[in-house]
Image: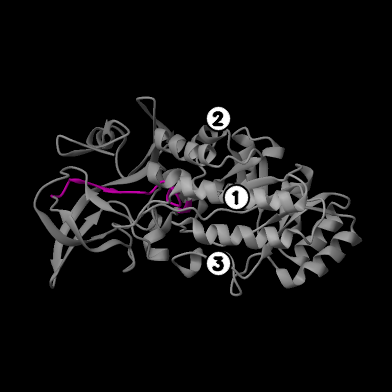
Amino acid sequence: MENKENRLFWGGFDVDFLARKYGTPLYVYDAKTIRERYRNIVDNIKYPYLKVHYAVKANSNPAILRLLKKEGANAETVSQGSVSLALKAGFKPNQIIYTCNGVEEKELKFLAENHIRVNIDSLSQLEKWGQIAPNTKVGLRLNLDLHAGSHAHLRTGGKKSKFGIHFSKIKEAKKIAARYKLQIVGLHQHIGTDTLTPKPYIQAMKALTKVAHQFGNLEYLDFGSGLSIPYKPGQEPLDIKEFGKEFDKTIDAFVHDYGKEVEAIIEPGRYLVAESGTLIAKVTDIKENGNVTFIAVNTGMGHLVRPAMYGAYHKIINASRIKGKKMKATIVGNICESGDTFGTERDIVAPKEGDLIAILDAGAYGFTMSSFYNARVRPAEILIDAGKARVIRKRQEIKDALPYF
């Protein structure tokens, strides 16, 4: 992100130029940022058997998947659809890992037929897998009563979480595995997202490595992810060097005690792509109701639902004039819902109708969570790479979307 001539430039391109060429609303991603974040991880974790599995759900655009695959990433998936996306992007079956709850048998059969590595989420799922694919290798997703995350919906561990096999059920899981001659070769956990300090992640790592001693012949430990970015003003970014140091120390200690080297899997999503992306929208209306000034834009919660769903904070700037006289305003979308709000009582450089605003850090869980709600079409996506901008997803047309309704 750069300020040139008092306008926002993204990946070296004038956002005003991009808006005129490709229209708004518009998702813009910077490939350089994605590569830098990936290198941050692999350069600072020295453990030789590290495997980075990108969380496909964070941003599933095929161009992003191919970019990360070329960098050396593997894929972490949560559905038959996301596995299919990874395969189409060029990932081989042995580069894909799958973890999900509430799975139908037909999806488990698909995974078995395509030789996808699976982390089993429940005893019932383990039983079904045994019936479908006996004499195979499996991993178990464990719930160790640990969680992290700034919102309840972002916590994927703990007593109130739907995810994983509770550690008190390990003996039952082993019995089911024995019944179907399944080899438990991996353990997985994911405590949640929004981690900006190494401590909660490393604590979870230590908990999983402790439990791992109850299993012989493990091939991998999957520590999930949760690594976040500083969305809010004043937040400090994750100290990735300290994280890597503590990660190595923890896995090295386990390998020493366990007597066998294992793959250490990490599943970053948000950390890799969030800061690469911005959602560009046009100011369509400015009005005062009572003592509140509302700035309306031509996008909404159907394109970026995180603020409405999680109360998530995204920095919002006037992309047409970075500096200038500021005003306090609430930035709202064009969806017929009171909750369609991107930012409440924000200080922003006073815009005019037709100005562009940029909602920052929108590269993760943005377009991938979009919808056709209110029958408003999805935006286009472009990727800036090596000084060139290209469309990686065309703007949805109403005529193409209506048949689904």
User: Residue 27: horizontal and vertical position, in percent?
Assistant: 37, 42
Extreme residue toward the top, this view: 387
User: Residue 175: horizontal and vertical position, in percent?
Assistant: 87, 65
Residue 304 is one of the magenta-drawn residues:
no
Q: Quadrant of residue 383?
A: top left
Q: Point out the frontmost of discs 3 and 1.
A: 1
Report which residue position mark 3 lands on: 147
Camera-side residue: 251 or 285?
A: 251
Quarter of the figure with the N terminus = top left
Relative to residue 30, is residue 354 drawn left or right?
left
Q: Point out the frontmost of discs 3 and 2.
A: 3
Q: Quadrant of residue 170?
A: bottom right
Question: Label 1 neighbourhood size at 10 Å, few (<14), some (14-19), many (20+)?
Answer: some
Report which residue position mark 2 lands on: 70
Question: Label 3 neighbourhood size at 10 Å, few (<14), some (14-19), many (20+)?
Answer: many
Camera-side residue: 344 or 194?
A: 194
